[in-house]
Amino acid sequence: MLLNPSYLLELLNTNNIKINKCIHIGAHKCEELPIYITMGFAKDDIIWIEGNDDMVAVAKNNNISVHNYIITDKDYSDVILYKANDTASSSILDMYRHTEVYPDISYGNTIKSKSITIDTFFDIQGIKADEYNFLNIAIQGAELMALRGATNYLKYAKAIYIKIHEIELYKNCPGVKDIDDFLRDYNFIRVITIMTDKGWGDALYIISS
């Protein structure tokens, strides 16, 4: 998470947004847990979802419960997760300019699985979606897929923190405008953008009144 959590809270408060619980898609090693605690979330207020079973095992060893699912815009479709030697770069999308920007990072093993949507995740887990109004998505170019599979959940979300791309690091990954255009239809506006010099960054979207 590139944005300072104190500033994130300030932005939410300024816009009269009270966050209750969080769902985090692309948990990796749950590095954001201390940030979430700083933001006022209890450990049990956070749902973690991660497609890489190796990272799920890491979290389990750290006494963090993570749901092992690959999230896209389709339910029960065949999907391949490509594991990278830098685990944070693992994705269901082929690398494109990623190999140019990060020449030392490459794919190795793969995971064959079935995808599900965010909406279906809430249904099969019996979790009340309306309690989780803060969404964080960081799944290496597949963020728009996840949003497209969350059309019911987005009725309840108040703030979305999401990884964005200015260049095509992963093949056919959406650009910032694609995310803007999709979320605008659900009354979300982008209020802050933080970019790295590698063509990716983070953005915060909030529900407009």
Image: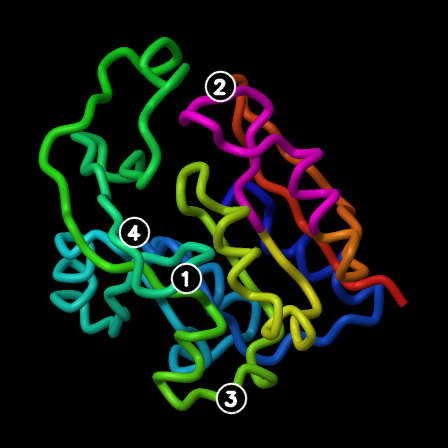
Expressed as whole percent of the image width and height from the top left, the position of residue 202 reads 58, 40
| Distance between mark 3 and mark 2 Cα atoms | 37 Å
Residue occupying the point 12% across, 61% down: 57
Instruction: Check if mark 3's residue and mark 2's residue have beta carbons within 8 Å.
Output: no
Quadrant including the C terminus: bottom right
* Kind of residue at badge 2: Lys
Q: Is 26 left, or right, of 166 in this rendering?
A: left
Looking at the rendered image, the disc whose residue lies closer to the viewer, 3 or 2, is 3
Q: Give the residue pinned by disc 3.
A: 128
Asked whether 82 or 37 is in front, the reply is 82
- The alpha-carbon separation of the residues under discs 3 and 4 comes to 24 Å
Label 1 – label 3 distance at C-alpha: 24 Å
Front disc: 1 or 3 = 3
Can you tell which mark lies on residue 28? Answer: 4
In primary-sequence order, the first of circles 4 and 2 is 4
Secondary structure at numbered mark 1:
helix
Question: Label 1, on which residue?
Answer: 34
Label 2 crowd bin: few (<14), some (14–19), many (20+), radius 10 Å: few
